[in-house]
Image (tube, grey):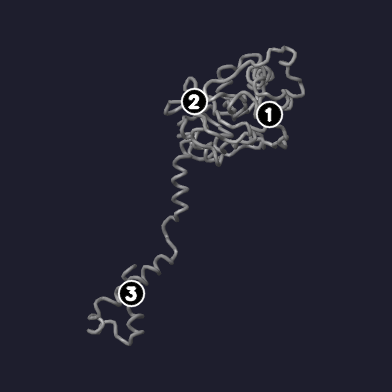
Amino acid sequence: MMAAVAFFVDIFAMSVQGLKPHSPFARSKSGCFSIVSLALAGAILFAAPVSAQSLSDKLMQSMGNDLRKLTPQTSPERPSLRPENKIPQRIPAHPQNVPAAPSSANFDFYVLALSWSPSYCADNGNRSDARQQCGNGRNYGFVVHGLWPQFERGFPENCRHDQANNQVPRDLVSSLSDIMPAAGLMRYQWRKHGTCAGISQRDYFTTMRNAYQAVTIPPALRAVSSPRSVDPQLVEKAFIAANPGLPADAIAVTCNRRRLQEVRICMDKNLKFRTCGEVDRNSCRSRSVNLLPNR
């Protein structure tokens, strides 16, 4: 194709100079016209439509190779979701204008722990206090395990021992059931971690929701319809891609019994992503873990 274009361009160049394409004079000009012809031919080729895949297609194909690792090996087609199994759209509550933590609070940063509910239910589904989360038709994916005040090394816990203030009102439990579907867990998290945040109980749970809403769950990890094996590093990369500004050393993917267990994300007291070396070092070391379905 290059030769053909060069030939026609050569004819054009020669005609402009009043020369015949195959005249002796034309051949003796030290390849000047040939160089011009080749340059023009190259420009035409680059300007012409490309029949091969475009660059964006190649990039999408490359991304697809990674995304296929999150899909079952035996079923390459993406299963369609029946109407009753569609992911319920999260309707975010308007973030409340409450301080995530006063500057004087005696800790350095928060860890938002997101638990993969199917893994929890596989081990605890028969417990009476797990029915709300693990009962029939409970298709939870990532839910909040806790919002934990942390030190750079270690963490505070059980900072208040007032039993009267350790109870969580029923209306507050109900208001968080979409992201933390376990009343007993809410009480436990408040006693162990919330009392160390330096804010009231309601402000703590409001901060928990705000932290949850600050994180985007990757689409491939919202509705998983069948068991699959997945590289924990791929899960981490999916969260980083879905959350601009999330550093690689601000997130840890944990596992237990070769199952995906949690994704832990570090935030400062204003709920902005921040690095956390100690948390990141506790990431799952397995090359492959089981991702149980939530649909």
Residue 176: image location, x then y, percent: 70, 27
- Mark 1 = which residue? 178
Rendering quarter of residue 134: top right
Tell me if label 2 and label 1 are in contact, CB under 8 Å: no
Residue 25, placed above or below residue 56 = below
- Nearer the observer, disc 3 or disc 2? 2
- Mark 2 = which residue? 278
- Of 61 and 93, nearer the camera is 93
CA gap between label 1 and label 3 equals 69 Å
Who's the residue at 24% across and 77% down the image?
30
- Of 177 and 8, nearer the camera is 177
CA gap between label 3 and label 2 equals 63 Å
Residue 108: image location, x then y, percent: 58, 27
175 vs 155, left or right, is right
| Secondary element type, mark 1 | loop
Q: What residue type is labelled 1?
A: Asp
| Secondary element type, mark 2 | helix
- Mark 3 = which residue? 36
